[in-house]
Amino acid sequence: MPNTFLEGPYAPVTEETTAHDVPVTGRVPAELNGRYLRIGPNPLGLDDPESYHWFMGDGMVHGVRLRDGRAEWYRNRWVRSRRVAAELGEPWPEGPALDGFDIAPNTNVIGHAGRTFALIEGGFRPYELSHDLGTVGPCDFGGTLKGGYTAHTKKDPATGELHAIAYYFGWEHLQYTVLSTTGLVTRSVEIPVSDSPMVHDLALTEKYVIVYDLPVTFSMPLAASGAALPYAWNDAHPARIGLLPRTGDASDVRWIGIEPCWVFHTMNAYDDGDRIVLDLAKFPSFLRDGRLEGNPPPVLDRWTIDPAAGTVTQETRDDRSQEFPRVDERLTSLPHRYGYTVTSESSPGELVGEGLLKHDYRTGRTDTRLFAAGSAVGEAVFVPSAPDAAEDDGYLMALAHDADRGATDLVIISAQDFTGDPVAVVHLPVRVPPGFHGNWLPDA
């Protein structure tokens, strides 16, 4: 039986490419000096294509280097896990991977402490990458990381520290950590949970770390069947969110029950007096029987949490199918006005889309920017025009497939002219299969 996630736009690319002086339509803003990096699954040497799971494909990172109004280079590189290095006939770069638990990260790629990291969750270690996307090796942050890490971090704009929550099927807890600006874990809290839930993201306010404990959990029957990703919707697992005070320990977590749902991604959260505002994309359920297909579409929700009353009020702000919410990350944990999502109205529930939405939480207005059919547009990353620019004064960067060229473009949009012509379109020489997350890593 054909595997959807190995065909059409999802089909893996088979070669690593380096291109210099990449052609551009329009003008790359001169203030954009840095690297746009994006990562996703790109399986290499599959033994059993029929059982392949998109979430578990070998990670390939794609990068575009912008400087002085030019697109200096494009590169794509597999992350060299033990298996990938062997498939490519190369020596493994070595490093502190966990014995018998190693994978090429495929979910997020970030910059921190002057270094570049490819991330994945579920008990696996990050891999460090070089500036030009070569693999340095697995990383345990100087021996300070216990077990694996996460695919999603939240950077505190006041301190520059990274907050994260990791999970692993062999633990009876979640691992909350704080990573310092020098790249060392300086705080770690084990939060007891049952059933080994999957926890893809977290939320952060100035007072709290918000923990998702939702009904997608480790499935022993799926594991026994040999499933690549043995996690599934679990009707018996109560849905709840936890409020961990920033300086508290596990005994200080306040748990609040909610209606069953699944949250992949937080847009942002902030304290509003004694309450908390939490914006996110919500699935009514996810991974039923462990399957990616057939899930109800995600919608944009705003949750208002009252810690004193122990209540969560849930309001759907936009019921169109949408995911991958982002904000101006200088406002992480602080009040925001604008947010950006990927919409997939024509194929509800899909994790790739055909357009972007811009949400104005002050006016309630939502602007829609549609791309050509089959564009498989990805997550939009906001980049301020200057470090002290106002919110929404900057650019959105997203990858979109160009069916006429059979290749992918990096589209740069003025956030304040969201539906207007792009400021610049960087024409990559190859197709980038749909992936997960990307980020802008400015020059130091």
Image (spheres, rainbow, N blue to C red):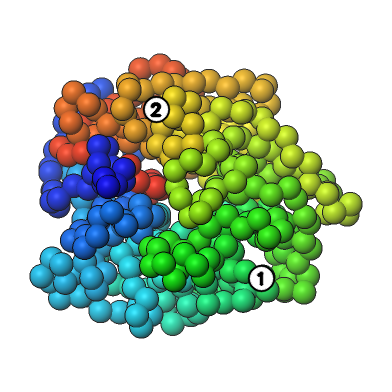
Residue at the outermost right position: 309
Element at badge 2? Answer: loop
Kindly identify which residue carries mark 1: 194
Task: State the CA–CA distance, disc 1 to disc 2.
Answer: 38 Å
Left or right relative to 177: residue 413: left
Q: Where is residue 329 in the image (x, y as percent from the top left)?
A: 53, 45
67 or 62, nearer to the observer: 62
Among the two numbered marks 1 and 2 on one chain, the one whose residue lies closer to the N terminus: 1
The count of marks equals: 2
Looking at the rendered structure, the kind of residue marked 1 is Ser
Q: Position of residue 357 (x, y in %)?
A: 50, 27
Kindly identify which residue carries mark 2: 354
Q: Position of residue 396 (x, y in %)?
A: 42, 33
Element at badge 1? Answer: loop
**Residue in the picture at 89% in, 52% down:** 309
Instruction: Locate the C terminus and report the quarter of the image it occupies.
Output: bottom left
- On screen, 374 above or below 134? above
Left or right relative to 24: residue 387: right
Looking at the rendered structure, the kind of residue marked 2 is Glu
**Residue in the picture at 25% in, 55% down:** 49
Left or right relative to 247: residue 103: left
